[in-house]
Amino acid sequence: MKIAIINGPNLNLTGKREPEIYGTQSFDQLYQELELHFPKVNFSYFQSNVEGELIDELQQKGFSYDGIILNAGAYTHTSIALADTIKAIKTPVIEVHLSNLLSRESLRHLSLTGVYCAGTIMGLGMRGYVLAVTYFVQQQKNVS
Ligand code: DQA
């Protein structure tokens, strides 16, 4: 099974950026953990600070992958273009946020992208990515 992890702006700084909000673990560490815990899953990882590049990656993976885990960072709250892409592709998308958006500033309460996602996991730090992978793996077991 193929799962793509796509991270948006500033998530390359995770581990160094506002650790009291986003934690101290880097995505490199998380990625290694995922590969270890889910040896049968074929992962791809992409991060960009550029909106159009995130759209390109969603389009590229969105017709052949089994699941996409997306943390669009601040584009979550602003990008109708990313929301349209999630709606257009075939692969189900789970939105993950490290922080609990609902307990933060009101400008983060709205998710435009989440409208078209299969589900959203927020506030559980890096564990959210592990839970999203677990969901896709179990879903596949249920249908096969
Ligand atoms: C974030 C939450 C967003 O509001 C913020 O702009 C981010 C990270 C999260 O993972 O908690 O960059 O997506």
Image (spheres, rainbow, N blue to C red):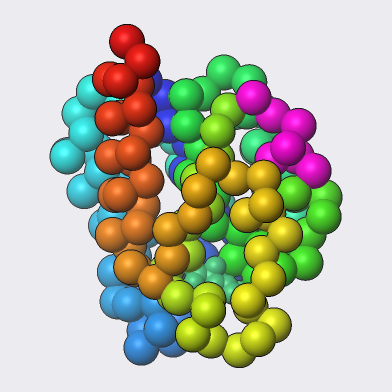
| Residue 49 magenta-highlighted | no
Quadrant assignment for the C terminus: top left
* In-front residue for pair 66/53: 66
Q: Position of residue 31 (x, y in %)?
A: 31, 48
Coordinates of residue 5 in the picture (x, y in percent): 47, 43
Q: Quadrant of residue 110?
A: bottom right
Q: Residue at x 53, y 86 (%)?
A: 104
Boundaries of the magenta span: 84-90
Is 39 above or below relative to 81? above
- For this view, does 10 lie left or right of residue 134? right
Residue lying furthest top: 144
Q: Nearer the viewer, residue 41 or 137?
A: 137
Q: Name above or below for residue 134 compared with residue 91.
A: below
Residue at point 67%, 45% (across, down): 116
Q: Quadrant of the N terminus?
A: top left
Q: Is residue 10 above or below residue 2?
A: below
> Whole-percent x and y of residue 140?
34, 21
> What residue is at 67 percent from the left and 52 percent from the top?
115
Front residue (pair 6, 114):
114
Q: Is residue 9 visible?
A: no
Residue 135 locus on image (x, y percent): 33, 39
Q: Which residue occupies the extreme front position in the image?
A: 142
Q: Is residue 40 left or right of residue 135?
A: left
Q: Residue at x 64, y 24 (%)?
A: 90
Q: Give ligand 1's quarter of the image.
A: bottom right
Chief secondary structure of the magenta span? Answer: helix
